[in-house]
Image: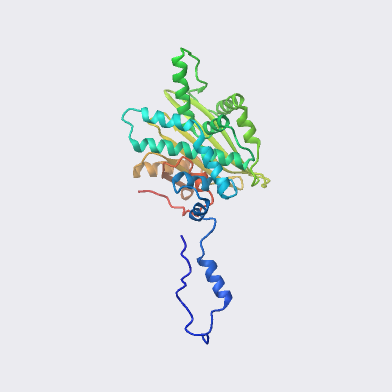
Amino acid sequence: MLGKIDSGIRDASASKIQQPKQAAKAASSALAPNPRSAPSVLAASGLPSDKLSSSIISFAKFFSLSLKPQVLADIRRQALALPVLGHSVKMAAQSVQQAAQSIQQAAQSVQSAMSLCAAAAESKGIELAPKGLEAYVDAVDPDSRRQNGQRQDRQKKDKNENEEKPSLKTESITGDNLRKAVYEYLEKDPLMEILNKLPGKNGQRWIVLPFDFTEGDREYNVSMRILLDSEKISNRAVCMVIDVLSDAGGKREIFIFESANEKITRLSFYQNLELSERKHHQYKHELSKHFSIPLQCVFVRTSEDAFPFESGFGDEVPSIDEAV
């Protein structure tokens, strides 16, 4: 990103006045590469230069992990070792007329989810066994949970088992219903409750609350991810992400609420399907009105990144509303 100092200027003779050392030092500091920038970390890590490595570095920064090559390599190893990747890619390959590009995207999405979960576990001071990491991925990533659920349903059908998949069925989504769904999920997976209680090494606590529900003839898989700051006396919730996957054409919507002084200060809405300009502005005004947030603090974007907050955390990204 930053160029090296131009060393072409040399003294013509010893009698010439040299540049002050402090000025030279300042210039060197200003032009030297940032050792914590993603390209610099990637170059020093020895990891392959691909999207997965970039995601691992972003997630490591999000959880304030060491950027030592061994730490990053361990996270990548876990992300690539989990069997769920094979299931996801296989399912994508078996889809009718599935393009090779879609298969690659499915693989990258699962890898990203696994690297995020491996980084989260590392920040909490633990390394999960493959089964534990798979369960963590299912809780964090609605798409992975849906694909694994579909695979399990097929296996049960093959065994003539008609056990109904646990899901909240309701025509009216209320806080009490959603709370019940979360509790039921955590009761069946005590590992998640343990992970949610463990703080990260940076003093923050990242908790995940997954739940599924049906409304009418639509099924939804949801992951609610909350970042708590233990150093704050009030308003400990720094950010809340609500990640919603619908069975309506694989539509995924991500709501990112950032807060300060017990008020929502910013709402970013991401959708993986392209929005028309009219829909873009419609969503923006509806979200502003519904959540009582100033219009200039609401941002609507189209992105295929499954974890836009976690992967972009701490980066200096201009707050530009990307209307087309």
Out of 146 and 300, give the one closest to the viewer: 146
Q: Quadrant of residue 210?
A: top right
Residue at left offset 48%, top offset 46%:
53
Is residue 29 depicted above or below 42 in this figure?
below
Out of 58 and 292, give the one closest to the viewer: 58
Residue at the top extreme, as displayed: 160
Protein image colouring = rainbow
Q: Is residue 293 visible?
A: no
Residue at the left extreme, as displayed: 97
Percent across and percent down for residue 143 are 46, 32
Total count of labels:
0
Residue at left offset 63%, top offset 31%:
193
Out of 57 and 46, give the one closest to the viewer: 46
Percent across and percent down for residue 247 are 41, 28
Q: Is residue 283 visible?
A: yes
Residue at left offset 62%, top offset 30%:
191
Residue at the bottom extreme, as displayed: 15
Percent across and percent down for residue 244 are 47, 34
Lateral position of residue 241 relative to residue 279, left or right: right
Out of 242 and 39, give the one closest to the viewer: 39
Percent across and percent down for residue 237 are 61, 42
